[in-house]
Image: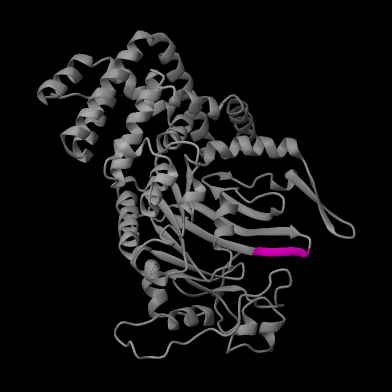
Amino acid sequence: MSSMEEVLVVKNLKTQFFIYEGVVKALEDVSFTLRKGEVLGLVGETGCGKSVTAYSISRLIPDPPGRIVGGEVKMGNLDLLRNINEEAKLVQKKRIKIKHNYKVIRNNEFFFNTIRGKYISMIFQEPMAALNPVYTVEDQIAETLLLHNRTRLLKIMKSASEHIPELERWRESGDIGELQGEIGEEIRKIKSTARGNESVRIHQDLLIEGGTRFSRKKEKYEEMLKKSIEHDQLEDKLLTDPDRNSQQQIIKKLAKESKKINLIKMSKKMKRNTKDPLLIEARRECFGLLESVGIPNPHGVLKNYPHELSGGMLQRVTISIALANNPKILIADEPTTALDVTVQAQILRLLRELQDAIGTSIILITHDLGVIAETCNRVAVMYAGNIVETAEVKELFRNPKHPYTIGLLQSIPRVDDPNKALKTIPGNVPNLIHPPEGCRFNPRCQFAFDRCKTEKPMTVEVSEGHTVACHLFSGKVIPE
């Protein structure tokens, strides 16, 4: 890795679901780190807790019945679970009940709306379920831009308003000269990514129209830009300020501002084709985002509803939404599920290309070890709500340690030996209402002994960067 900076630290994350049958212990002390610019694979059987981990990090666990009951998720100096215990209290009577503090929950949700989409984005497992069926593709991409990227949109429109003659000359003759600043950077980006003359013309027309509209009400939009810059500075300070009290004051301000934002009103404006320069620039950005993910005829697709698109096209749309604001962290929850093999390859190649272009760190969730080998830098293997092994991808495939990891690798068909009988892991993932004592894998493990049935294994380091939670190994215990 070129950089060892940690952009996300997850420590002792514990998530449970309180249902009528009992408490589902979905995650139990999950810990891992995500480094800047890397792709971390999260792999395991269906039901092992991969998606619950992703939803816990993004604070999307439905409550009820789910609750994050402990742990830390740190992004920079900010602990995203800083006051999780204030949201609700567990009351033990005949059955466990949860007493909620809805004021704290609402404030946390307003605060987390500033984090989701801008700093942490997610590509969901089922794109048709992730998109709203009654809004067009344009409405849904523009929504995240208007919520999180107002400063950039307004800066480009302000710069365009100051260079209308140059933009007109560019449209007529193709000569743009040596433009600098926001508009110069944007035009260089258009020239390097636009697909043909028709694409460039659409960008040109929208820049000129938005710049003209901005200049007509310049004072209004410059004041809006000033407030938007102040808002962004508050958000950036939140991640870098080590003082918890100062963080709390910033969170209160951000929550207060979030309450004023009416996304339904934004969508109605988009539907009425309002000539607001902010909305015009949002439309141009939507067009460019669909181009960047390889969608043919992006101008036409923007007007489509989700049911009018194929699975591969929908997945590209959800990727464009997730990457609209250049997030620091992207969580891709099985982004190639239910897609053709050729489309899977295109999606994975697209993720790597976009990751290289904007430097986003990715958590890739999958049960396909082939995808892990092709795409990831490091991999964490999950079983029944625990991470049992973590290593660099090449090290894990060359030298697996945990019996569960060995079983997964032995169950992969091999092209070089198609007649070889595949090995299987006996049994099923355990019922997490009543998980096995000790190591949760012990009922299915061929190497299990008495200690495995009574004592939970500690995570130990067997070589540099290679950790395993198994009683078969001893070594330096990873500090809590």
Depicted 415 relative to depicted 394: above or below:
below
Query: Which residue sits at x=24%, y=29%?
Result: 202
Q: Is residue 43 in sight in this rendering?
A: yes
| Figure quadrant of residue 40 | bottom left
Residue appearing at x 36%, y 29% in the figure: 283
Looking at the image, residue 199 lies above or below residue 51: above
Q: Residue at x 58, y 89 (%)?
A: 447
Query: Of 175 and 320, which appears nearest the observer?
Result: 320
238 relative position to 292: left or right? right
85 within the magenta span = no
Query: Which range is magenta?
Result: 21-27
Residue 379 percent location from the top left of the image: 45, 67
The residue positioned 77% from the left and 40% from the top of the image is 101
Position in image of residue 306 (x %, y %): 44, 44
Image quarter of residue 323: top left
**Position above or below: 149 against 130:** above
Taking the image as shown, residue 447 lies to the left or right of residue 335, namely: right
Residue 73 pos. (x, y %): 58, 51
